């Protein structure tokens, strides 16, 4: 009698853990890309800002479900999408904005849990050099 409820609770806990890990990992990935871009004015003005931010974001998401070492690009069929731009911060100083979007698959339970979760985080850091 209790086995279906135990399985349901296990799946719910597993999905909740996966969702929380995805949120934390995506925030760390966005921060890592922004730190690289804000390290110097040269990095912030680089034509490869998005590509470099993607590289740092993927390094942070290597252990996340669906990413691993096989994912080498951001966007397209990849579960990770990164956009990085040079912006003006709230204080009027040059800044870098990095947005990371990560789509993770979950165990679907009809009418309760969706099959996937899309997490998006943006970090804006002031350029230091």
Image (tube, rainbow, N blue to C red):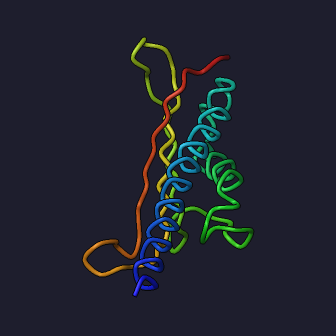
- Where residue 110 sits, quadrant-wise, is bottom left
Relative to residue 88, is residue 49 depicted above or below? below
| Lateral position of residue 3 relative to residue 59, left or right | left
Considering every residue shown, the one lying at the far bottom of the view is 1
For the point 41% across and 71% down, the residue is 116
| Lateral position of residue 76 relative to residue 64, left or right | left
Q: Quadrant of the N terminus?
A: bottom left
**Front in this rendered view, residue 88 or 19:** 19
**Front in this rendered view, residue 3 or 36:** 3
Question: What percent of the width, then of the height, locates residue 126?
Answer: 55, 21
Considering every residue shown, the one lying at the far right of the view is 69
For the point 54% across and 26% down, the residue is 125
Question: What percent of the width, then of the height, locates residue 112?
Answer: 29, 72
Considering every residue shown, the one lying at the far front of the view is 1
Considering every residue shown, the one lying at the far top of the view is 91
For the point 69% across and 26% down, the residue is 39
**Front in this rendered view, residue 123 or 91:** 123
Question: What percent of the width, then of the height, locates residue 25?
Answer: 59, 50
**Front in this rendered view, residue 86 or 6:** 6
For the point 60% across and 71% down, the residue is 66
Relative to residue 94, is residue 111 depicted above or below? below
């Amino acid at each position: 009698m209790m086995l279906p409820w135990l399985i349901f609770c296990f799946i719910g806990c597993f999905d909740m853990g996966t969702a929380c890990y995805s949120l934390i990992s995506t925030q760390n990935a966005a921060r890592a890309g922004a730190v690289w871009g804000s390290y110097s004015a040269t990095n912030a003005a680089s034509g490869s800002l998005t590509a470099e931010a993607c590289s740092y974001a993927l390094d942070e998401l290597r252990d996340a479900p669906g990413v691993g070492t096989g994912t080498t690009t951001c966007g397209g069929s990849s579960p990770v999408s990164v956009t990085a731009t040079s912006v003006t911060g709230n204080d009027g100083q040059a800044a870098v904005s990095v947005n990371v979007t990560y789509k993770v698959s979950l165990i679907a339970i009809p009418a309760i849990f969706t099959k996937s979760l899309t997490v998006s985080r943006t970090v804006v850091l002031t350029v230091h050099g």
